[in-house]
Image (cartoon, rainbow, N blue to C red):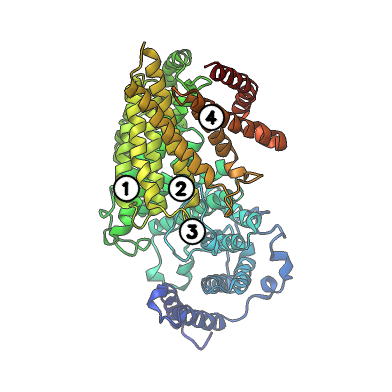
Amino acid sequence: MANVPWAEVCEKFQAALALSRVELHKNPEKEPYKSKYSARALLEEVKALLGPAPEDEDERPEAEDGPGAGDHALGLPAEVVEPEGPVAQRAVRLAVIEFHLGVNHIDTEELSAGEEHLVKCLRLLRRYRLSHDCVSLCIQAQRQGFTMLPRPQVIRLRWPPKVLGLQNNLGILWSEREEIETAQAYLESSEALYNQYMKEVGSPPLDPTERFLPEEEKLTEQERSKRFEKVYTHNLYYLAQVYQHLEMFEKAAHYCHSTLKRQLEHNAYHPIEWAINAATLSQFYINKLCFMEARHCLSAANVIFGQTGKISATEDTPEAEGEVPELYHQRKGEIARCWIKYCLTLMQNAQLSMQDNIGELDLDKQSELRALRKKELDEEESIRKKAVQFGTGELCDAISAVEEKVSYLRPLDFEEARELFLLGQHYVFEAKEFFQIDGYVTDHIEVVQDHSALFKVLAFFETDMERRCKMHKRRIAMLEPLTVDLNPQYYLLVNRQIQFEIAHAYYDMMDLKVAIADRLRDPDSHIVKKINNLNKSALKYYQLFLDSLRDPNKVFPEHIGEDVLRPAMLAKFRVARLYGKIITADPKKELENLATSLEHYKFIVDYCEKHPEAAQEIEVELELSKEMVSLLPTKMERFRTKMALT
């Protein structure tokens, strides 16, 4: 390198970085990695100009640095060792080059070569990993490649597709190979290294790129701090995903929450992406019935999403969000769907807490929950203090203002339930603006099903039976058109869900109409006709559901799949009950209905005898079926005797 000016070396390195950042779609279609390969060639030139690695670092057996050696995750240096002297400085510069070569190979899907370069980087930095000069590069060392991991289902953090760093780069690489525990070790090592550095040193460390910058272009302390904190935030983000894959959901949520909080603190976020991540995190809290935390995430999502277009593009947001209207409307619809789930789950949880063994409102349970309400309100402040809050100052106030308009407590009566219902319905309309049937069939149907479920749970709180009937009628009106538009061949499962739900809505309406008729001394023919029509409609959709389970030869399966076992048994039970509820003045027709009813009750009993595991799915319905199987023959015999006498 003695014959090459240092400025020329730095210039080659900066040119390589510039080529590395070229977006793939800007390369020729037949050479998508052209810029990456050009960058790699320049990095190799710089590496050659720097000379060979110091022997005491590079000649050690490679196995010592491989996964499982423990060095990458354990045994942090007991003291800070700065890379002083020309040999140490050359080792660190080479480590920077090895890092970028590793990233380059991973970007071009050459994972083994990428791993080799990243391990070399770690080896060169072994002695200096806690130093001011090297800690940032070490923390980044176990990460690249993680962006190729399949997206988690529960906690769905996104991150702008940027080139990241090394310890974290190896964490990403091993995640791609499903070596999740190895990735966990690398990333946890990075976390421990950050914590130790901040405790023992604390000053903003050198950014790896500064190794190839002239003195006058070195970063300020403020910029170094910003970049270092960003590196650590990335690390938390990837740990959240590792814990997600390991099904350590509590830890995953904690790290996801911490990531989002840090992004706000350091003003390093993309409003649309931050908002959708916060809204997605709310779903974890909803599943855990932590409604205060879920409400906080959703309120923060609304506030931050409102910043879209107000924040100028940064290196993490290469284009202004206002330039992608379709993405904007899609994310808005996704956040709306998260709000729907919040309202629906909170209402359903209240229903489960207050219903009796036949699904009706239990006034005693309702009174008990009212007595607990004051205690819940008294504990609110202490719960809030324990929760991780997003934002400070004006941002915190804005989030609180949204929160205050939405309850996190289970509704105890119709008025409280109606407030949640109206909020959920508002977001249903918002979600449907983007998720329309033409283009987003499955999403649109799920939104409509949630809308139906909101009406269903609201009906639980309603004491007026006529109004309850109208709510179920609204459900049917929104669901029935879907069965016309859907191709049953391609949307079999969705069709089954809708058929079952429509059948159940008609079933509930019939029960309500029967209850209304029972209050009357002499129900007129109009009411009787209405009950029979509802009965007929319920039978129609239950039968459509059951027929969908038949094979191509129209034969009902001897063994019902686990995924549809309970709904199939419930459908059989309700069909049996519906035939027994048909009102007719014709004794012969009534006897036929009783025979059909008995046939379905017997199916349930016989099936559960042959398949004992099914009994656990429908314990209550099975007991009632057994009872009816013993009672109906006697009732039918009385009918036959009566018919013979007349």
SS of the residue under disc 4: helix
**Marks 1/4: CA–CA distance:** 46 Å
* Disc 2: which residue: 495
- Count residues near mark 1 (Cα–Cα under 10 Å), then give few for <14, some for 14-19, many for 20+: some
**Marks 3/1: CA–CA distance:** 49 Å
Dividing the picture into quadrants, the one containing residue 166 is: bottom right
**Marks 3/4: CA–CA distance:** 86 Å
**N-terminal of the two: label 1 or label 2?**
1
Amino acid on which disc 4 is placed? Glu
Amino acid on which disc 3 is placed? Pro
SS of the residue under disc 2: helix
- Count residues near mark 4 (Cα–Cα under 10 Å), then give few for <14, some for 14-19, many for 20+: some
Q: Are marks 1 and 4 in contact (CB under 8 Å)?
A: no
* Disc 3: which residue: 205
**Marks 2/4: CA–CA distance:** 30 Å
**N-terminal of the two: label 2 or label 4?**
2
Q: Nearer the viewer, residue 290 or 316?
A: 290
Q: Nearer the viewer, residue 631 or 637?
A: 637
Amino acid on which disc 1 is placed? Lys
* Disc 4: which residue: 592
